[in-house]
Amino acid sequence: MTDTRYDRAPGDRPILPGMEEEASSGLIIYTIGLVLAVVLTATSFWVANTSLLWPPGVPLGLVVLAIAQMGVHLVFFLHITSGPDNTNNVLALAFGVLIVLLVVVGSLWIMFNLNDNMVPPPELMNLHMQH
Amino acid sequence: MNIAVAIDDVRKDALPSASEAGPAPKRIVVAYGFWIFLLSDIVMFSALFAAYAVLVRATAGGPTGAELFNQASVAIETACLLASSFTCGLMSLAVGSRRRTTTYVFAAVTFVLGVVFLTLEIREFAGMIAIGATPQRSAFLSAFFTLVGCHGLHVTAGLIWLAVMMAQVEIKGFHPTVERRLLCFALFWHALDIIWVWLFTVVYLMGVRP
């Protein structure tokens, strides 16, 4: 019975041997997560306010930092790992990420294309007619 | 016959896989269902994010994000939410090892940090409305109040949920049902923090840039 492998719930901590050991290893995991998240957040605020970096690259840098911090939260706080007992949770997450990307990237792509192809306002049309 | 024996030998080494172990325990099923709800909630937020990103330049001559947002207040809000996510994790550990007082202490810290976050956000909204930057002013402000307000509503719901859970721990003790609900609450609270990461990146940090 004890050597049967069960699925793991999202939010479950990875190691579950004894109560004492569980608490201390869990504390270490949450603390590592907190430290990484604080470092990434501080970097984000620094990147947004510094003038040392190439300005057009800053938004991309901020997105990369946010993705990294999302990864830290998923692994250290929500305990989503790539272990065999976590397959269902990871698959659901992958599907969610797919839908989120479709919605966000699709909306931005279509709307910016529409803006580019928009008929110019009447004043502009008149300018063309004037000469 | 020989083949059957060989297969038996192989099977003895490998642990039975999850699907062969019979139905999963209830807490696994409950947490998985709640995880799917959270993902659908995140999909809803992605639609609000997409609307905000499309409308961010549509200020209709009104105030822009660079004029309205105060980075110091956002930094404090971020710190509060991150710290409350951490104390929520510590609360889960205390629940796991059945320490009631520790659970109450960390739940209280989580609650207070959540309240500080909400207070700062409401003060920010009130300040914006006072100078005429209401949701009716421009498409940008409508999208802003919808997106950030929706996250604020989720935090409010989380705070009410946390208070109810502490009452249940007080009355019922660490009953398996209560434990499953606490697991779901921890998932909810951590997921809200992930959404806030994107909020402060997309709305506040990218918004203050010219």
Image (tube, coloured by chain):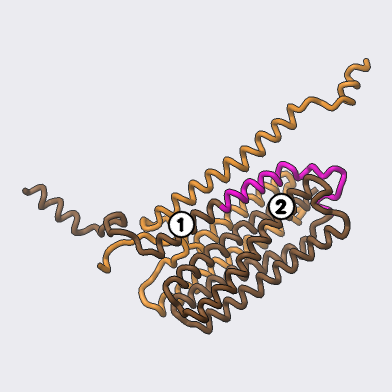
Chain colours: A orange, B brown
On screen, residue B205 versus residue A121, left or right, reads: left
Q: Which residue lies at the image location 84% right of the left edge and 54% below the top edge?
A: B133
Which amino acid, by three-letter code, is at mark 1? Gly
Which image quarter: residue A106? top right
Q: Which residue lies at the image location 29% right of the left edge and 56% below the top edge?
A: B17
Q: Residue farthest to the left?
A: B1
For disc 1, the chain is: B
Instruction: Write down the residue under mark 1.
Output: B33
- The answer as to whether the residues below labels 2 and 1 share one chain is yes
- Give the structural element (helix, strand or loop) at label 1: helix
On screen, residue A3 versus residue B114, left or right, reads: left
Question: The N terminus of chain A is located in which quarter?
Answer: bottom left
Asked if the magenta segment contains residue B60, the reply would be yes
Which amino acid, by three-letter code, is at mark 2? Thr
Instruction: Write down the residue under mark 2.
Output: B146
Asked if the magenta segment contains residue A69, the reply would be no
Residue neighbourhood size for the residue with mark 1, other residues' Cα within 10 Å, grouped as few (<14), some (14–19), many (≥20): some
Per the picture, the main secondary structure of the magenta-coloured stretch is helix
Which image quarter: residue B30? bottom left
Give the number of marks: 2
Q: Which residue lies at the image location 12% right of the left edge and 51% below the top edge?
A: B6
Q: Residue farthest to the front?
A: B171
| Most foreground residue, B93 or A46 | B93
Residue A6 rendering spot, x and y as whole percentages: 33, 61
Residue A46 position (above or below residue B102): above
Magenta region: which residues? B41-67
Residue B173 rendering spot, x and y as whole percentages: 47, 80
